[in-house]
Image (spheres, coloured by chain):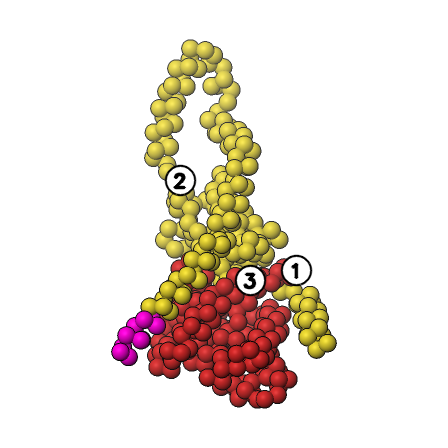
Chain colours: A red, B yellow
Amino acid sequence: MHISEGVLSPPVLLAGGILTLAGLAIGLKNLKNKKLPEVAVLSSTFFVASLIHVPIGPTSVHLILNGLVGLLLGWTSFLAIFLGLLLQALLFQFGGLTTLGVNTFDMAFPAVICWYLFRNFVKKENLKLSFIGGFLAGSLSVFLAGIFTSLALYFTEHNFISVAKALLIAHLPIAIIEGCITAFVVTYLLKVKPEAIYE
Amino acid sequence: MNKRLCLLFSLFLMLISVKAALAHKVSVFGYREGNCIIGESYFSDGSPCKKCLVEIYDEQGKKIAQTTTDEKGRFKVLVNEKGSVKIKLIAGEGHLAEYEIEGLKEVTEKNQTSSQKEISKKIVKSKNSQIQTSISKDELKKIVREVVAEETEGIKSMLMDLKKDMSKAKIHEIIGGIGYIFGIWGIIALLKTRKRL
């Protein structure tokens, strides 16, 4: 879901840039020293996840893992996702430098929304509830990313419903896979390193 | 049991969901052959862009031709423009790729041909003048073009494969990227702890 350069109009790019800057500022403010290694690991997880394609039939979608990043980092996920996308743009020409703002917001804001929605859910003593919370966070963040991406594209393609539909259908398998991954990671972390979730 | 069910369900859904390719980067590559432009488009994992819109623009940015790619991501379009042209591939959902083909260098070509013509004239005059009269210049050009096209077919497909390989992510780039991320966070950690002291 990386939007290429030259697709969006300047106002959309600018709006995305400003929103991302705001997100980055909040992220920096909330950044705790203790969390730094975790942020670094999750930045690289996000960076690598986009290279994992799920090739089924003619489909070629890749993992995003923004739900996992969001659930573990909260507002700091803006920093992690921004850095991951920046390096993807520089090294692999995914997306682009001008669309970096929009792309970051499209991926990081759903992560933050899912963090607000499911952080308490996951922290429950019940492992089954945490599993469900993780699954929902993982899949919902992918769907929300699809919706935000189609919103950004709406201003140039003027066809919100069809673009959103195409993106959501294509990302359905990814949403389920990411839901499972996030759920397993969350339950695993609760068992071995609960402070990663609780802090 | 729960996990297994989950996996099975996700596999099932992956199999039934069939939709146009949605990778993160799309590339297009083309070349001129006679007055046609032939090209190929593909996503970063090497899979072709099927049924995508291709637009050809001239130097002034005016659209001069339009076509769609076939099942293998290839396209061929008739263009009479001699100057440089820009190929624009619109893969939808925010994916766009551009490629520029340089214009035909008419002046240098003419110089070359005129000098070559003189040489060939001399040769022809000295050997047999029948060939020059029986084959016109245009016909000769056509024949040469056909032969060259056949001969270079292999090289062209090799170039395409090379281009495709180049757009794939390399393992050293991935590892390098991870290194960058840890380096940047290391610097941030350093700055933060220094501030506190």
- The image shows residue B176, relative to residue B84, as above or below, that is below
- The residue shown at (59%, 89%) is A125
- The residue shown at (38%, 80%) is A32
Q: Main secondary structure of the magenta part?
A: helix
Q: Give the range drawn in magenta.
A: B188-197
Give how far across and how far down residue A4 sits, in percent.
45, 63
- Residue B149 relative to residue B106: left or right: right
Q: Residue B176 carries which label?
A: none
Q: In the image as oriented, which residue stretches furthest toward the top? A: B126
- The residue shown at (40%, 78%) is A34
Badge 2 and badge 3 both on one subunit: no
The chain that hosts pointer 1 is A
Three-letter residue code for mark 2: Leu
Q: Quadrant of residue B1?
A: bottom right
The answer to which of marks 3 and 1 sits earlier in the sequence is: 3
Pointer 2 and pointer 1: residues touching (CB < 8 Å)?
no
Q: Residues within 10 Å of mark 2 (few under 14, many from 20)?
A: few
Q: Name the residue under label 3.
A: A52
**Front-most of residues B79 and A101:** A101
